[in-house]
Image (cartoon, rainbow, N blue to C red):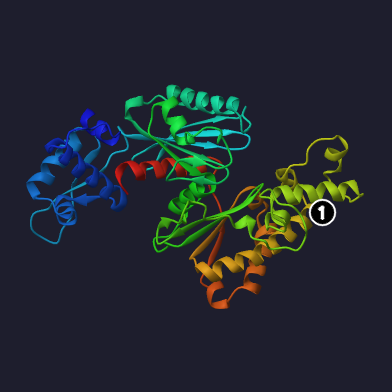
Amino acid sequence: MSSLIDFFNNQETEKGLSHKNNLIKRNVIAYMAANGEVTLAELTKELKISVPTITKLVQELAEENIVTDLGKVETQGGRRPNIFGLTCSTLYFAGVHVGRDRMTCVITDLQNNLVYECVYNDFELSDNDECLDLICHNISDFIGKCGYDRSNILGLGVCIVGRVNTSKGSSFHYFTSTEESLREIIEKRIGLRVLLENDTRARCYAEYNFSRSKTESNVIYLHLGLGVAIGIVSDGKLYYGKNGFAGEFGHIPFFNNEKICFCGKKGCLETEVSGIAIEEKMNELVRNGANTILRKRYEAKEQIHIDDIVNAARNDDNLSIELIEEAGEKVGKAVAFLINIFNPESVIVGGNLAAAGDYIMLPLKSATNKYSLSLVYKDTRFRVSKMEANANAWGVAMLMRNTVIGL
């Protein structure tokens, strides 16, 4: 078992028979992860490995509790073969979402089951050394108390808001003061192999894997939170673009409003339909005397958050409903542009605004229908995310698993 864990952790230096056998074992694990339960004959055919070698190595994987013998499979006649599948124990992966106001950490197994979760609410993301120290401290604390042997955790996926170059392990918004990438810094401090990912893309991957139908391979995840972004799955794979910056949907120059966006440009989609933009509109309207159940919060000098506006809308507050519906109509027109280009099977809507339900979805779909080609729109399914707040961490743990086992 230790040799295979060493192999997964890239600590194997020999290139002899042991290394070759571990490569085959990894391919067996990857095939089972992608295709489910299989027979030895199927593995022999798909991996092009001899029957004696496959039989021997699968038996070793069973002894290591990575693969389990599920018994005989029913056939039309002749000798019934045994069928094998992955177990849920022994090998694990960690996923961490570094959000703006909390950190969510999870442990998953080989079959992407979530087996442990921890949330650090006393956290605020800032671009300074103190915050980086806290991130690493929280991750170390989480790994230490999760209850799983550290040597059996084969990798740590970390997703963070902002632009991320996954191949280089670099964040372009946070912790850029040194030549070391954020991935390298975390790897040194935590002592685990690290994958760095953008938070929207990580959630997109989780949404795709847990809610797709068997026929879906092209999906767009639309995140309507404090900002606006998309994740793209094309032919079953996340789409990154050249440097990993694909999905900056919120920074399309969609409006002639002279508003300066966070990115420094004027008129971006985010300046009208993001959670921050809706918060600013609500505060301005209340300041000018508009009637809303949120007036008490304003007068008490409490911050009006987008979640407060969504909750007010769900409690029949007309002003909140109007602001959300306006945002839905505007973003729907932009989504029409997206589906005309990508022609996806599904558009999944998540983020803070998704909790508004029909108040956001009906105007969004109506505007998309109005401005898109009817042939494209009628083939696209829209749905609201049903995943919990831990989806980002779960998604990046899944991506770490895929990296380790070679999917």
Q: Is residue 377 above or below residue 150?
A: below
Percent from the top left, x then y, of residue 384?
Answer: 58, 55
Q: In the picture, residue 365 is in which quadrant?
A: bottom right
Q: Is residue 47 left or right of residue 311?
A: left
Give the residue drawn at x 48%, y 22%. Answer: 141
Q: Is residue 397 above or below residue 364?
A: above
Give the residue drawn at x 41%, y 43%. Answer: 398
Q: Secondary structure at mark 1?
A: helix
Regarding residue 152, the answer to whether it shows in the image is yes
What is the crowding at mark 1: few (fewer than 14 residues within 10 Å), some, or many (at least 20)? many
- In the image, 404 versus 310, the foreground residue is 404
What's the residue type where badge 1 is placed? Answer: Leu
Q: Residue furthest front?
A: 179
Q: Is residue 375 above or below residue 335?
A: below
Give the residue drawn at x 56%, y 72%. Answer: 377
Regarding residue 292, the answer to whether it shows in the image is no
Percent from the top left, x then y, of residue 271?
Answer: 72, 54
Q: Which residue is mark 1?
A: 319
Q: For the N terminus, which image quadrant?
A: top left
